[in-house]
Amino acid sequence: MIGINAFFGDKERPFTLTDPMLIELEAKTGAGIGVLFQRLMANQFHLGDLSEILRLGLIGGGTSPEEADRLVNAYAKDRPISEILPLALDVITARWLGADEVKADA
């Protein structure tokens, strides 16, 4: 399984970085998935990386693009990085290692 369910905003929501969402993530961030994953793991990410991972993870999990954008604007932007980084890491790690690995670390 490559997706997770996590609390975001006001309830548990599904996040999945499907292949089309990964391609879009690479285009939006200007980095391949390997580089992006390494940037996050090394705390050398760009702020926009986090919101794009969350937005595209929501869309891949079944949220409409409009709703995903609204949720990210309401609950991820202008928030402390320490609030959104763990979720973005969980979403991308679920795709990299599988969701079972994310649950084992939680």
Image: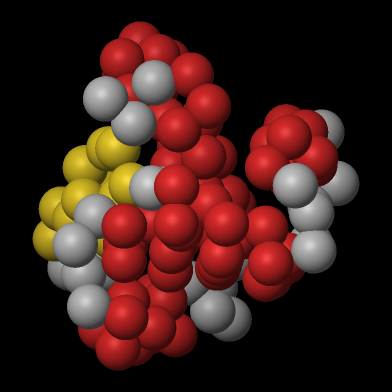
Q: Which residue shows up at 58% across the image and 81% down it?
A: 78
Spot occupied by residue 9 in the image (x, y as percentages of width and height): 27, 68
> In which quadrant will I find the C terminus?
top left
In the displayed structure, does residue 43 sit left or right of residue 20?
A: right
Spot occupied by residue 52 in the image (x, y as percentages of width and height): 56, 67
| Outermost residue to the left | 11
Q: Quadrant of residue 59?
A: bottom left
Q: Quadrant of residue 65?
A: bottom left
Q: Which residue shows up at 51% across the image and 40% down it?
A: 92
Of the pair 17 and 42, the residue shown nearer to us: 17
* Residue 40 visible from this viewpoint: no
Count of number-bearing discs = 0
Of the pair 77 and 34, the residue shown nearer to us: 34
In the displayed structure, does residue 88 sit left or right of residue 43?
A: left
> In which quadrant will I find the N terminus?
top left
Residue 3 sits above or below residue 53 on the image: above
Of the pair 79 and 52, the residue shown nearer to us: 52
Q: Which residue shows up at 21% across the image and 69% down it?
A: 63
Q: Which residue shows up at 15% across the image and 53% down it?
A: 12
In the displayed structure, does residue 103 sit left or right of residue 44?
A: left
Spot occupied by residue 67 in the image (x, y as percentages of width and height): 25, 83
Spot occupied by residue 81 in the image (x, y as percentages of width and height): 63, 60
* Residue 58 visible from this viewpoint: yes
Q: Quadrant of residue 105?
A: top left
In the displayed structure, does residue 63 sit left or right of residue 84?
A: left
Residue 67 sits above or below residue 10 on the image: below
Of the pair 21 and 80, the residue shown nearer to us: 21
Say how the picture is coloured: secondary structure
